[in-house]
Structures are given as C-alpha cells and as structure tokens.
Image (cartoon, rainbow, N blue to C red):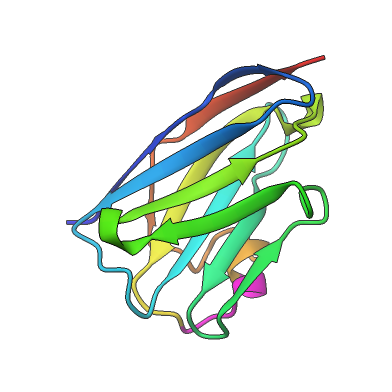
Amino acid sequence: EVQLVESGGGLVQAGGSLRLSCAASGFTFDDYAIGWFRQAPGKEREGVGCFSDSDGTTYYADSVKGRFTVSTDKAKNTVYLQMNSLKPEDTAVYYCAVRGSSWYGSRAICTEDGRYLEVWGQGTLVTVSS
C-alpha cells in the first residue's frame, strides 16, 4: 500500500521560505508522476507544481512560477516543495500526490484537478502572515 506523509508546513511571514516534504512508502520513483496541490478556504484545489517522467518536465502554476521548486530525492523516497518569497495568498493546505506510471505530461497532471494522480497525502497547512 502506498502512503504519503507531508510535513514542513507552518506559519511564516511574507517574504519567507518553507520547504515541504512528502515521504512516500510502498512507492518506487520510477516511471512516475508527482504533484503538489493546494486548497485555500473557499477556493478550488490548485496544482502548483508537478513532474512527470513521461516528458521529463516540471510544470508550475503561474501563481508560483519562479518562487516554488519541486524536487525528488529517490534515495530518501521523498518529494520536496521549496517555497520562497511567500505571499499571504499562498496560505492553504498543501497536498502531495503520486501516480505510479507517467502516462500524462506534467501540465496535465497539474491542470486536470489532480484526476490523474492515484494516492494523496493528508495535507499540511501553510499560513503566510502579512
């Protein structure tokens, strides 16, 4: 059984940084796709950064491009979301999710409401104060 556990959320001032971690168990990072999504109160879920082995690219939402970076440490079976220059509008619960085959490109993984991802973590809250 695949399980994902996010950590690293918390309260940070605007302009600060956080690194979220997503530890995966029962999952092999080979021919895979991953996504980081967020959902703020009263808003729809948004894909912020996604990687797919199918095209080897990482897609970022315009709202985070240049500030967020997705990376994977295969030795640790962990995916990261480095978030810099945080803004109050980045406040949300952040989720990681994976797919065990990279059939879809990174843009599709991020922009189709996460429908192509198979396993989701429980989420971690990020609060950015102004």
Check the image and report above or below for 10 versus 102.
Answer: above
In depth, the one of 67 and 108 nearer the eye is: 67
Q: Find residue 126 and report its horizontal and vertical position in percent.
A: 60, 26
Check the image and report above or below for 88 versus 71.
Answer: above
Check the image and report above or below for 98 versus 6.
Answer: below
In depth, the one of 67 and 60 nearer the eye is: 67
Q: Find residue 39 and report its horizontal and vertical position in percent.
A: 63, 37
For the C terminus, the image quarter is: top right
Q: Quadrant of residue 102?
A: bottom left
Residue 115 magenta-drawn? no
In depth, the one of 80 and 46 nearer the eye is: 80
Query: As drawn, is 102 to the left or to the right of 56?
Result: left
Q: Quadrant of residue 112?
A: bottom right
Residue displayed at 50% across by 38% down: 20
Residue displayed at 48% across by 48% down: 80
Which residues lie in the magenta part?
Answer: 103-108
Query: As drawn, is 99 to the left or to the right of 71?
Result: left
Q: Find residue 14 and report its horizontal and vertical position in percent.
A: 78, 21
